[in-house]
Amino acid sequence: MALMRLLVVVAVAAAVAASCRPALADPAVSALPGLPVAGLAVGFYNESCPQVEDLVLAEMRAFVEKDRTLGPAMLRFMFHDCLARGCDASLMLKSRSHKGEQDAASSYGLRGYDEIEQIKAKVEAACPLTVSCADIIALAARDAVYLSNGPRYAVETGRRDGKVSAKFDAENDLPPPSSNIVDLKTYFSVKGLGWKDLVVLSGSHTIGSAQCSTFASDRLYNFSGKGVQDQSLDKAYAASLREACEPGLDNDTTSLPMDPTSPYDFDLSYYRHVRGNTGLLLSDQALMDDRWTREYVERMAAAASPDEFFADFAVAMTNMGRLEVLTGGSGEIRETCAAYVD
Ligand code: HEM
């Protein structure tokens, strides 16, 4: 227990130190952050499966051409895989007793399981038992960004797949959409991610949608459990949201874009919405409640070019992609990504 507390304190201290750093000069898109992880490298499969990145991109292109909502879904998928028990594809594992990550409340609305499996089948046909599902998830997330006109940043590979999947991990480690800024920073810092990773990765909400059931209560009908609308929400935007999401429907699956201006373009308009009090989730709007994250939102909202955001996004995705990875002799390379843990 004492050790656990110490680890948390050290992680929080490191993240706070990172968060307190003033904004530095922009890193280039290709630049990777410090502290490399042994066993991960850009081009890990250059010899063993040189065609893997082309295969993933071709599959992703086909999926997104057929159904463009799959791009955002695949980006979100990596976040959920990495935050719960690390980037080890444990999200793909199934539990007959409903105790796996897929069964957690935080996994509600996740899509992409079948698509990851289909990509894996293509990769297996070319390079049997070579490429992990965790790497496929990371490459698919990158290509989702690229296919939405975002950056095609370099992705480190070399992860191996875990054999354990616990609902408990996902429920504890993924921030709920009702999180305030203190909660968000804590969830991220426990993983060694700083405020900059938080504000940059939240920019992923520039694509995709959220269901009424995940935000209507918090923002429209029962803010802070008080039966009222969130006063920080722009009034005209709130009125349009109320039309789409009826009160009292806990399971309303109506989906609304998180960036209504350009829901399938990976651009800066998410930050413009947050600055203008038209961020959809409480956790989006919460970025205005901290000096550092607010300054970043405001700078991106005013920026003429997305270059700085794109460069920061490459770094933050690399940071997230390094969380608790299994490399070398740890974990396994499975023939299929899905497998039953019980
Ligand atoms: C900072 C804390 C975060 C919270 C509280 C959060 C919460 C959510 C919620 C509630 C949804 C809507 C789910 C639904 O209603 O179906 C969503 C969607 C999404 N999230 Fe996040 N998220 C966070 C961070 C991230 C990060 C770090 C990424 C990626 C790196 C990400 C990528 C996405 C994407 C792309 C979607 C759209 C999914 C789709 O359209 O299918 N989110 N998020």
Image (cartoon, rainbow, N blue to C red):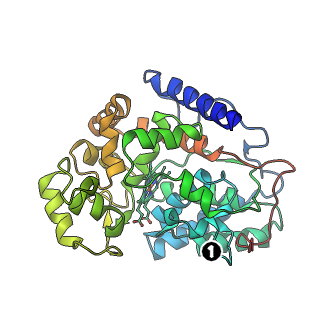
Is residue 317 shown left or right of residue 181?
Answer: right
Q: Residue at x 34, y 69 (%)?
A: 213
Q: Dot 1: what SS?
A: loop
Q: Position of residue 7 (x, y in %)?
A: 66, 33
Name the quarter where the N terminus is drawn: top right
Residue type at tag 1:
His
Q: Quadrant of residue 212?
A: bottom left
Residue visible at 52% across and 70% down in the picture: 111
Q: Is residue 209 above or below residue 266?
A: below
Q: In the image, residue 243 lies at what x, y percent? A: 17, 71
Instruction: Please rate how many residues cluster around mark 1, counting C-alpha atoms within 10 Å: few if below 14, some from 14 to 19, many from 20.
Output: few
Q: Is residue 334 above or below residue 4?
A: below
Front-lying residue, 147 or 5: 5
Percent coordinates x, y for residue 269 in the rendering: 30, 48
Q: Residue furthest front?
A: 1
Q: According to the image, label 1 marks what residue?
A: 98
Picture residue at 22% right of the left edge, 61% below the top:
220
